[in-house]
Image (tube, rainbow, N blue to C red):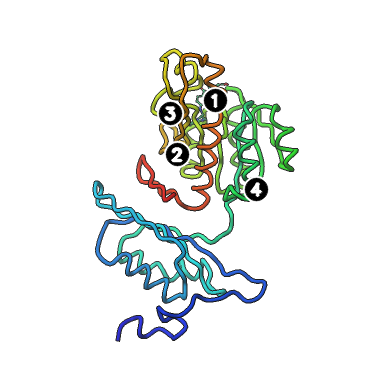
Amino acid sequence: MTAVDSLPSSLQPSAAPAAAPEGRTLPQFVLTITCQDQVGIVHAVTEFLLAHGANINEHQQFDDTVHGLVHLRTAFTGPLELTRETLQRNFVSIAERFGMRYEIHDQTPPRLLVMVSKSGHCLNDLIFRWRAGGLGGEIALVVSNHEELRPMAEAAGLPYIHLPVSPATKEEAEQQLLALVEEHDIDLVVLARYMQILSDDLCRALAGRAINIHHSFLPGFKGARPYHQAYERGVKLVGATAHYVTADLDEGPIIEQEVIRVDHTHDPRALSTVGQDAEALALSRAVRWHCEHRVLLEGSSTVVFR
Ligand SMILES: Nc1nc2c(c(=O)[nH]1)N[C@@H](CN(C=O)c1ccc(C(=O)N[C@@H](CCC(=O)O)C(=O)O)cc1)CN2
């Protein structure tokens, strides 16, 4: 008798997926796994989900033969009574058997804190997608080292916190930011053209939960004025790079990049103007994919299950 044979009829492979009672929706979850590649991983995962009455909606896998690793993302719908805590508790033994690094998420949208300076095109795009329900997370508040974007945030009903930064106030400002992250139960900090360099301590505190948009196609043109560098170089493509924030400026693991064709008629201002579209698109995609648990960090790189 196989493991499947021992399951109740409602869980037999041919059984229809569990249905939600009137007015209720079935819980949805995402499981992400990284481990050494070995036989039986997918079988163990699918047998575990079957035993909990879960119905797989999306499954993606990448075998990284360079590093001998396998990365999985499985999105599934559970029976009404299934919880993240039950899954977490029951999956531990499987994770230990295969030496898995894993996360189990329910459908609670991550809470976002957006940081800005004076340029509003990325914030504007994030607010539009959030209000349209297409960002994958909830914007909780906006923090800035300037006042210029307060009207945009407050018009969207968002709290706006002004934290001026100078060499004298930087440490205090960063402590206040961390206090806001705790106070508002923030899951992700989004640097949406925030033009101050975060300290090593702050980067460590926000490791894996802070995304920046750099206004160039990295690794080219790092720093604060990439469009001037691009103009001087005479490039024919400009772009933007969304990456996790690390202490090494503009060196964090890349999540998404976008490019736009330009030519000799574009001066630095024109390059900056056309580049804004690439920045807004790359950042919003990266934020949504992070919120949907589609981005797996692997050392200095990422695996993105788009
Ligand atoms: N620790 C990190 N902090 C930040 C990163 C990062 O990758 N790691 N990205 C920046 C954004 N950025 C480029 O994408 C960037 C922003 C600002 C500067 C810079 O030189 N700033 C000057 C001040 C400039 C000003 O006041 O306008 C500085 O901080 O001395 C370079 C790159 C966000 N933070």
Tell me the residue at 41%/29% (across/down): 218
- Mark 2 — residue? 256
* Residue 299 location, quadrant: top left
Q: Nearer the viewer, mark 2 or mark 4?
A: 4
What residue type is disc 2 on?
A: Glu
Secondary element at tag 1: helix
What residue type is disc 3 on?
A: Phe
- Mark 4 — residue? 132
- Mark 3 — residue? 217
Sequence-wise, which precedes: disc 3 or disc 4?
4
Sequence-wise, which precedes: disc 2 or disc 4?
4
Find the distance from the CA under tag 3 to the CA under tag 4. Answer: 28 Å
What residue type is disc 4 on?
A: Ala
Find the distance from the CA under tag 2 to the CA under tag 1. Answer: 18 Å
**Which label number is shown at residue 274?**
1
Whole-percent x, y for residue 35 in the image: 31, 56
Tell me the residue at 57%/30% (across/down): 194
Query: Which of 144 and 16 lies nearest the eye of the viewer?
Result: 16
What residue type is disc 1 on?
A: Val
